[in-house]
Amino acid sequence: MKRPTLRPAADRRQLPALTGVRFLLAIWVVFHHLTGHHMMLEGWAQSPPGWLHEIVRGGYLAVGTFFLLSGFVLTRSYGETTWSRRNLIRYGAGRLARVYPAYLLSLLIVSPFMYGFLANPATTPKLPVMTSYVFVLQGWERAVVHWNTPAWSLSCEFFFYLCFPLLAFCLHRRSGTTGAAAVAVAIALPAVLGWLGAPTYWKPFSHLADFLLGIAAAGIFERVSERGSRWTRRGWWLYVPAVVAGACVVALPSLTAGWTTLTIALRPMNFALVLGLGLGGGLPARVLSTRLAKLLGDSSYSLYILHVPLLWWFSRFWGRAAVAMPAVYTAAYLILVVAASAAVFQFVEGPANRWIRDWVSARTQ
């Protein structure tokens, strides 16, 4: 009798609002890059009120929310897993299948620019740069070539994936101290890393706190859901204040200047946002749970990892025109990149994910 493939439990208990919010986070990252130096919306970014400028340019902060979501989803998916050798292999294959196919496609899209860089005799060293990109090590380095800027976050994800089985064993979700322990470690971690002198450019270490908070949020969510708490379907009490407070922190960076970073300050808001959307309730959660929102959310990783490689080509062919008519070309670019990401999810990312999982499962019976 064929043994069942190790599949994430969340496939059977999806929380559609959390899928839908991924698209909004990915679009926030896209606008961050479109308003960067020499980008098509650079001029526009200087014209709105200062608070709006800070919010648009703060798209890089969405990555912390993604990391917290990752911890939340992995805990719900694999929290009950028995970590046998077979399941460890299947888990590793599943994590690789989730991330690498779309990332490999991003490298193929940007490969002509990579070749031009590497073919230049003045470019040194070539091998470390290529090794960094092929093995997704950008998040561990002080400076990398920015062929695909968001790819540094994949270094963090792979590091979290490696840590998760041990973390899941130590922080079992049914333990009454799971949430408190994960939160305590997440709060203390930045200070501990600073005391140990860990380089600030080791981003997987500095963002491990986000991942731990996601694990804590999943543990709280499961206990609340199982007990039929009055909080079920009333998550808007958490996510609405979280969005308002988070927007204020991002729009007014002077609130945190001198005592903490925006990334650290936003962690409690991200925690409440993810937990609240998981619990559901309220119009925003219902909108994020619609079929269209789920479709866009499913393709959000492809959008996130492909938008910069596609922007290289877009800028090469229409860069000057885009600066002259930024609104028109920004709309055209957004339509292109959203449509391309949906197609990649449907025909590349999803099928490759299933094929890798099934191939490994068939060889680990």
Image: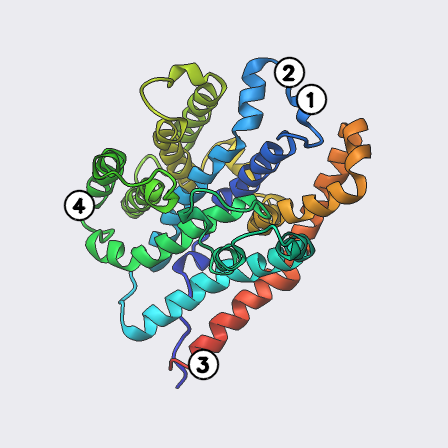
Q: Which residue is mark 4?
A: 176
Q: What residue sits 43% from the left and 47% below the top? A: 139
> Callout 4: few (<14), some (14-19), or many (20+) C-alpha neighbours within 10 Å?
few
| 40 sits left or right of 212 in the view | right
Distance Cα–Cα, label 1 vs label 3: 53 Å
Q: Nearer the viewer, mark 2 or mark 3?
A: 2
Q: Is residue 79 visible to the viewer in this orientation of the structure? A: no
Quarter of the rendering containing residue 361: bottom left
Q: How many marks?
A: 4
* Residue lying farthest to the front in this orientation: 121
Provide the residue designation for mark 1.
44
Q: Amino acid at mark 3?
A: Ala
Name the N-terminal-most of marks 4 and 2: 2
Disc 4, SS: loop
Where is residue 250? Give x, y as percent. 47, 23
Q: Secondary structure at mark 1?
A: helix
Tell me which numbered mark, 4 or 3, is placed earlier along the sequence.
4
Q: Earlier in the sequence, mark 2 or mark 3?
A: 2
